[in-house]
Amino acid sequence: MLINSIPQYIQGITNAKIDLTATDAETLFTVPSDADFNAVSINSILVSNDDTSNASTITVNIVGDGLNSAGAVTAHTFSLFKDTVIAAKTTVELLTKDIILKSGEVLQVQAGHVDRLHVVASIQELSKTRITTSAIVSI
């Protein structure tokens, strides 16, 4: 895979998981800022509502640098899904295509109600080299 003409290698795979027990925005995943890593591919975001009779909503945001109206780079929150309804006793796949996040960006989730939603994101960590510095250190 190429991002900005830089070869990318899958360095690792993981599932980021969270049980939303409050209605505050929670960090689901932060893209590593290690020199070896420069991006992740979010392949799936599953949201499960384990309440037996009540729907809830979920908001999913990316927090990272972006351009303001004057064209200057500033920290910003970008909404991916806003108050998406998750019916009782259902699981919903939010993504239809992969999302790429760059080093240091944060994937946040926020529930509309406490103790109803669980979120699982399937993630591929991408590196610029086949063998990372951290892998060499552990040898």
Image (cartoon, rainbow, N blue to C red):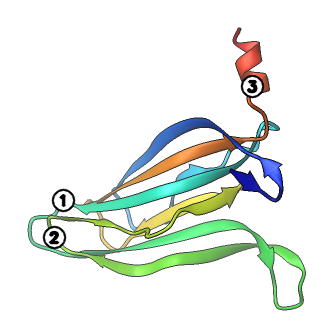
Q: Secondary structure at mark 3?
A: loop
- Residue that numbered label 1 is attached to: 50
- 79 or 43: nearer the eye? 43
Location of residue 22 (image quadrant): bottom left
Question: Can residue 1 be seen?
Answer: yes
- Give the image quarter of residue 83: bottom left
Residue with the mark numbered 2 = 88
- Res 116 visible: no
Q: CA distance from mark 2 to mark 1?
A: 7 Å
Q: Earlier in the sequence, mark 2 or mark 3?
A: 2
Residue 54, horizontal then vertical, whole percent: 15, 74
* Amino acid tagged 2: Ala
Which of the two discs, 1 and 3, labels the residue nearer the N terminus?
1
Is 114 on the left-hand or right-hand side of 27? Answer: left
Q: Position of residue 102 (x, y in %)?
A: 72, 56
Q: Position of residue 109 (x, y in %)?
A: 47, 64
The tally of labels here is 3
- Residue type of the residue flagged with mark 3: Ile
Above or below, 75 against 37 in this view is below
Q: Residues within 10 Å of mark 1 (few under 14, many from 20)?
A: some
Q: Which residue is located at x 55 percent, y 51 percent?
A: 29
Q: Nearer the viewer, residue 113 or 34?
A: 34
Tell me the CA gap for discs 1 and 3.
Answer: 41 Å
Instruction: From the image, tell me which residue sits under label 3.
Output: 131
Q: Residue at x 63, y 76 (%)?
A: 78
Q: Position of residue 4 (x, y in %)?
A: 82, 59
The kind of secondary structure element at disc 2 is loop
Q: CA distance from mark 2 to mark 3?
A: 45 Å
Quadrant for the C terminus, please: top right
What secondary structure is found at the residue carrying circle 1?
loop
Q: Identify residue type, mark 1.
A: Asp
